[in-house]
Amino acid sequence: MLVESNYPLQTHNTFGIVAKALQLVHVRSEADVQAVVAHAQLRDLPKLVLGGGSNIVLTGDVKPLVLKVELKGMRLVEETDKAWMVEAAAGESWHELVQWTLAQGWPGLENMALIPGSVGASPVQNIGAYGVELQDRFESLDAIDLRTGHSFSLDAAQCAFGYRDSVFKHGPNQASGGSRSMGLAGQALISRVRFRLPKAWKPVLGYADLERKMAETGITQPSAQQIFDWVCAIRRAKLPDPAVIGNAGSFFKNPTVTPEQCADIIARDPKVVHYPLDDGSIKLAAGWLIDACGWKGKTVGNAAVYDKQALVLVNKGGRDHPCTGGEVMTLAKAIQTSVYERFGIRLEPEPVVV
Ligand code: EPU
């Protein structure tokens, strides 16, 4: 087991914020986690599991022991008449998994192309884009209990997936959405994730941006590779590449409101972007709400609201003059206040604030 002190994290969080991990362990095998659990000084420390660092805001040096997941490997575990079952280790890049499955001729993940981050982080917030969520392709995962070192597996029901939510986002004393089981945040390290990719593949094209691509190109029956290319093009046009401009993707979740609240907002702002959900509630586009409050391009220090998508906060100082986590959070709080004052809606941040 390799333990490092004062380990720089600037290149391990996609905002590019400067911070150190006071202590960090590289997790390259399950044995590394077991060694931590057996270690007299390390085992009782609070722990932070770090994947691709694409969904965190670092507001200072990290005091919990950082477990940096570097587990590798992707394989086909089973092929039946109905589906391919693919397994990837938690430290693999999500986008590389999407590319690899398509190259093998196993479609199903294409709508989630180019989402930054690692495979191990993907179930934590049930990533999703362009009409497909991780839970739609998820089979099961393996994780290691950080108190005992024992491995265990969870199926989809046990993960209690919700919109950008799972059992891994809730603390041990807090039940997670729709589940009576207690949360696993900080208690477990996801080591492998398995996906079921049905052979009866059907393209998912209901999302407005994809409908626009179909209309523009005249292609009405796109292949999975075509959808992958469209999704990459759409994302590149409106979302900043974290390798160029630091960011953590959407900074807030899209809020849901009652039909009455929505009608009230429409009466004042007829253009509000809203989508009815199956349960009768209505999802509002947080990006639209923030944009309507005039936030595009606004800054606090070197933290800024991205000028092409108001839901994304960016580090406009680059590597040399990066924003601080404090600037990001000050900007985020000012946005929350202004959206609340105008629309009466409390926006909930998506990234984990450390
Ligand atoms: N909009 C504006 N102004 C803005 C931003 C958006 O008017 O500044 C409007 C858009 O025109 C559109 C609507 O708001 O009508 C929704 O915007 P968009 O299609 O860009 O999607 P989103 O709801 O903002 C969500 C996910 C993204 C995902 C896209 C595509 C969340 C929090 N975000 O964004 O996920 O890529 O849909 O499926 O659910 C992420 O989670 O990090 C992420 C990037």
Image (cartoon, grey):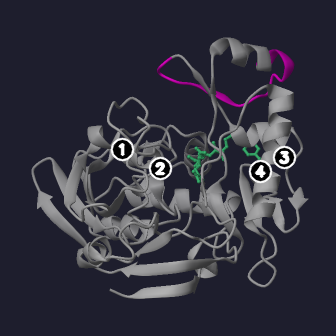
Under circle 4, the secondary element is helix
- Say which mark, if any, is on residue 125: 2
Residue 73 visible in the shown view:
no
Is 118 situated left or right of 243 in this image? Answer: left
For label 4, the crowd category at 10 Å Cα-Cα, with few meaning under 14, some 14 to 19 and many 20 or more, is many
- Look at the image and tell me in which quarter the N terminus lies: bottom left
The residue carrying mark 1 is 135
Of marks 1 and 4, the one in the foreground = 4
Q: Amino acid at mark 1?
A: Gln
Tell me the CA gap for discs 2 and 1: 10 Å
Q: Image quarter for residue 119?
A: bottom left
Decide: is 129 above or below 161.
below
The residue carrying mark 4 is 332
Of marks 1 and 3, the one in the foreground = 3
Tell me the CA gap for discs 1 and 4: 28 Å
The segment highlighted magenta reads 266-279
Q: Are marks 4 and 3 in contact (CB under 8 Å)?
A: yes
Q: Position of residue 176 (x, y in %)?
A: 42, 36
- Say which mark, if any, is on residue 207: none
Q: Are marks 1 and 3 in contact (CB under 8 Å)?
A: no
Of marks 2 and 1, the one in the foreground = 2
Decide: is 24 above or below 122.
below
Decide: is 220 above or below 26.
above
Q: Position of residue 345 (x, y in %)?
A: 74, 29
Q: Earlier in the sequence, mark 4 or mark 2?
A: 2
Q: Earlier in the sequence, mark 1 or mark 4?
A: 1
The residue carrying mark 3 is 334
Q: Earlier in the sequence, mark 2 or mark 1?
A: 2
Q: Earlier in the sequence, mark 2 or mark 3?
A: 2
Tell me the CA gap for discs 4 and 3: 5 Å
Tell me the CA gap for discs 2 and 3: 24 Å
